[in-house]
Every structure is written in C-alpha cells, then in structure tokens.
Image (tube, rainbow, N blue to C red):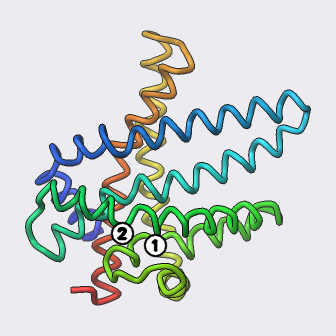
C-alpha cells in the first residue's frame, strides 16, 4: 500500500499539472478512441457480426490505454528520477516517446486481441505481462524490442502485484463511474454526456495507477 500512498503524494503535489496534461494530451486521445470504437461497433452491428466490433474496440482501447499513460509516466519520471517536475520537460519527454510507444502499442494490442480470441484468458495474461512496457521505454530508455523484452520478464516476475494494483484502482474507478452515471442520468441522460463524464473520471483516476506502477517499477527494477 506504500506505493499507492506515494502515488497520492505525487498527485497532491502536481494536481494542476495533471489537470493540464489531462485536458490537452489525454482527453483528446480518449475522444478519438471513443469515435473509432463506436464507428466500428456500429459498422459490424449493421452487418450482423457485432463480435468483430468487440475486437476492434479492444484493439483501440489497448492502444489508447498505452498512449494516455505516457504524460503521467513522464511526470512520475520527473518526480522520481529528477526530483522536480517541470511541465515543459514532461511535455517534451511525452512527445519524444509517443511514437515508439505507439508502434509497440499496435503490436501489443494485436497480441491482446489474438489472445482474447483464444478463450479470453490468454489475452488477459498478455495484457498484464506486457502492461509496463511504456514504463520500461521511458524510465530505462529501452526502445523497440528491448523494451518489450524487459517488460515481459518484469511482468512475469511481478504478475500478481501488477494485477492487484490494476484491480484496486479499477474498483475505485468503477465506483466513481457508477455514482457519476446516476448523477448524469438525472441531469443529462444522453450518450455523449455519459461518455464524457466517464472519460473525465478515467482521466482523473488514471494518474493514481500510473504513479503507483511507476513507484513500484523504479524500486523493483532499481531504476534510481
């Protein structure tokens, strides 16, 4: 629990930077993901094969998950490694690593989709084992295959802890999202209103997971 506590301290000290990064770098990615997911879901639903739409949604969601973590991983890098957080350095570092992480995310998402098509469990295993590859890329500057390789070995050794951290934060997000759903339903019962509120909640809670995993990874991998 110390890792989660550390993440809350980082969050408290950098809340304004987190909001700015969320507004200008995270929410746009999530809106694009929302558009693409709904487009392919409706497209395959028209043709009577909605299961294909599910795989496209999973593909885009995994890519989006990798990309939206980048600014917050870079922020935690500045806090943990450099001890001071400058927004300009976070933005520059985010832009520097976005392309290689995006390319790896395409492969990662494809592996998760293929694994999920094989009775779901292999997809979940792949999702967790390689989950920290963006952290490896940013904290250790290991790009392309070397980043994947180290993330795989780290993920195998620390599978249960990574899974536990993800589930704890996911439960918190689901609780907040459920409360927000009922509130939105009373005030503005429209799909876009619900979707935007869910995106906003995810943007605010995601940094807790990222900072937790960053603290855990840097300690166990002896980054600093």
Of the pair 45 and 187, the residue shown nearer to us = 45
Marks 1 & 2, CB-CB < 8 Å contact: yes
Q: Which residue is mark 1?
A: 132
Residue 134 placement (x, y as % from top left): 43, 70
Q: Helix, strand or loop at disc 2? A: helix
Q: Helix, strand or loop at disc 1? A: loop
**From the viewer's perspective, is 122 left or right of 142?**
right
- Residue in the picture at 30% in, 37% down: 23
Please tell me whether residue 197 is drawn above or below residue 12 in the rendered image: above
- Residue in the picture at 21% in, 65% down: 6
Residue 70 placement (x, y as % from top left): 37, 60
Between disc 1 and disc 2, whose residue precedes? 1
Please tell me whether residue 53 is drawn above or below residue 220 in the rendered image: above
Crowding at mark 1 (Cα within 10 Å: few <14, some 14-19, many 20+) = many
Q: Which mark is residue 213?
A: 2
- Residue in the picture at 49% in, 54% down: 65
**From the viewer's perspective, is 179 left or right of 118?**
left
Please tell me whether residue 118 is drawn above or below residue 69 in the rendered image: below
Residue 137 placement (x, y as % from top left): 40, 76
**From the viewer's perspective, is 214 left or right of 50?**
left
Instruction: Give the quadrant of residue 3.
Output: bottom left
Instruction: Give the quadrant of residue 62.
Output: bottom right
**Mark pair 1, 2: CA separation:** 8 Å
Q: Which mark is residue 76?
A: none
Q: Quadrant of the N terminus?
A: bottom left
Residue 106 placement (x, y as % from top left): 61, 63
């Amino acid at each position: 629990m110390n890792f989660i506590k550390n993440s809350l301290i980082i969050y408290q000290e950098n809340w304004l930077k987190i909001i700015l990064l969320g507004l200008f770098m995270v929410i746009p990615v999530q809106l694009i993901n929302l558009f693409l997911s709904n487009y392919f879901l409706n497209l395959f639903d028209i043709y009577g094969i909605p299961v294909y739409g599910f795989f496209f949604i999973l593909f885009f969601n995994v890519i989006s998950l990798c990309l939206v973590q980048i600014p917050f991983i870079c922020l935690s890098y500045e806090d943990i490694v450099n001890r001071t957080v400058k927004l300009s350095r976070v933005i520059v570092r985010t832009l520097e690593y976005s392309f290689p992480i995006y390319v790896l995310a395409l492969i990662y998402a494809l592996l998760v989709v293929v694994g999920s098509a094989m009775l779901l469990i292999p997809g979940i295993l792949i999702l967790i084992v390689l989950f920290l590859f963006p952290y490896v890329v940013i904290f250790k500057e290991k790009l392309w295959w070397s980043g994947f390789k180290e993330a795989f070995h780290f993920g195998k050794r620390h599978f249960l802890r990574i899974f536990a951290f993800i589930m704890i934060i996911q439960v918190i997000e689901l609780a907040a999202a459920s409360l927000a759903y009922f509130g939105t339903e009373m005030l503005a019962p429209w799909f876009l209103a619900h979707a935007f509120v869910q995106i906003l909640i995810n943007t605010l809670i995601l940094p807790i997971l990222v900072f937790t995993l960053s603290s855990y990874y840097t300690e166990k991998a002896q980054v600093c």
